[in-house]
Image (cartoon, rainbow, N blue to C red):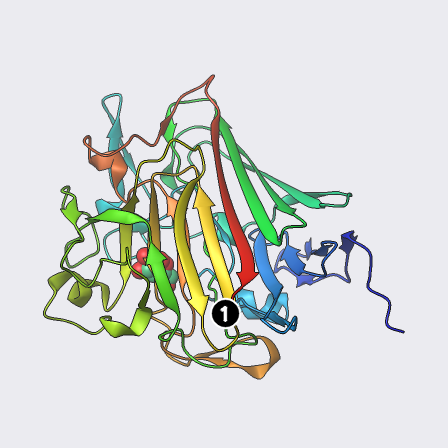
Amino acid sequence: MEQTPKAGIQKDAPFGTLPDGKTADLYTLRNASGMEVKITNYGGTIVSWTAPDKDGKYEDIVLGCDSLGGYLKGVPYFGALIGRYGNRIGKGKFTLDGKTYTLATNNGPNALHGGKVGFDKVLWDATPVEGEEPSLKLTYVSKDGEEGYPGTLTTEVTYQLKNDNSLQISYKATTDKPTVVNLTNHTYFNLTGGVKRDILDHEVTLYADKLVPVDKGLIPTGELKPVAGTPFDFNTSTKIGARINDSSDVQIKYGLGYDHCWVLKESKDSLKHVATVYEPTSGRVLDTYTTEPAVQFYTGNFLDGTITGKNGIVYKHRYGFCLETEHYPDAPNKPSFPSTVLRPGETYATTTVYKFSTKK
Ligand code: GLA
């Protein structure tokens, strides 16, 4: 009879060698029901993640590469931790306490996802924490001035796999000078299992009434816009593909589909419900919860078939979707947006939970 491996965490064979000779490791977290998440300390990246379908079949539900080499060739943040600032900062500049900082720009004139060498491209220190609900603790100290950001930022991210088939990601950071921080994870999900086709038939509910509209360069205009009556209203479960090409809506046009920040509904719970995503053929359901005020829902509009991922699968247009929980883009330049400033003596602490279940 087949033996179910025990819940816990193990270190696998090395994932690959970086150009500077350092080794990237790979860890497998397993829970009591058999869910498995593989994470490398390169970029704190979730490499693979299995979830059961309605018949109990476990399949991989995230995009990624077979080895470190794939990530080093360049991928659009597959599964990675994003920092210091998830999303865009307009013109790569901001002013804090009267001083203007110039950041590394990597997205036209703007700074995106931490700059040229963001937290997705650095080697984190990893500490496995054994248990029935195992964790991997990752730490990274970003130097004062790295990618233009002020202050030494000491960052700690813990992934914990729970027996209710959820993965909890806890982010913490402290600084020695005033700075800005907005950490997230950039996993691309595809709930078909083994990435069988695009994500357009996935049915999405987003618990949000307002959108952060952007300009052509995807920088917020500064206002908040009600989603009611637009292709951005997902308060009732709707297929991703139903309105994604409705370019009569200028926001759809600018985003080339969905690539926007939704403001989550207020909640008395510290963990707000972000979204429910249901994939009808597999019956898989993904619920996301966060302490963050917003989420960037991105539908893989830039995927174009040029990247071949795990098991030789070509990642074509809209083969994955991301739910990047976060503060709003460009908040350092928008005083009316919730603040992303972190000062010495304070601790940045946020939590996001991705939970799987099934529906027949
Ligand atoms: C984010 C951005 C997108 C794109 C992807 C990566 O979600 O908002 O515009 O850059 O990352 O390709």
What residue sits 46% from the left and 60% below the top? 77
Q: Nearer the viewer, residue 233 or 160?
A: 233
Residue shown at the point (42%, 22%) measured from the top left: 177
Q: Give the image quadrant in which the ligand numbered 1 is located.
A: bottom left
User: Taking the image as drawn, is residue 153 in sight?
Assistant: no
Relative horizontal placement of residue 121, taking residue 336 as reference (left or right): right
Q: Which residue is mark 1?
A: 191
Left or right relative to 148: residue 223: left
Which image quarter holds the N terminus?
bottom right
Quadrant of the image occupied by residue 331: top left
- Vertically, is 188 above or below 126? below
Of the pair 149 and 19, the residue shown nearer to us: 149
Residue 35 x/y as whole percent: 67, 60
**How far from the left and from the top, in percent, is residue 190?**
48, 70
Residue 341 left/right relative to 16? left
Q: Secondary structure at mark 1?
A: loop
Q: Amino acid at mark 1?
A: Leu
Q: Quadrant of residue 148?
A: top left
Residue found at the far top of this picture: 345
Pick the front one: 198 or 115: 198
Give the residue displayed 69% in from the left and 63% down from the top. Answer: 15
One can see residue 221 in this view: yes
How packed mark 1 is, by other alpha carbons closer than 10 Å (few <14, some 14-19, many 20 or more), is many
- The relative height of residue 35 versus residue 315 in the rendered view (above or below) is above
Q: Position of residue 216 (x, y in %)?
A: 15, 59
Tell which residue pokes out farthest to the right in this image: 1
Residue drawn at x 65%, y 73% as measured from the top left: 57
Could you tell me residue 297's position as x and y percent? 34, 57
In-image side of 101 versus 11 (left or right):
left
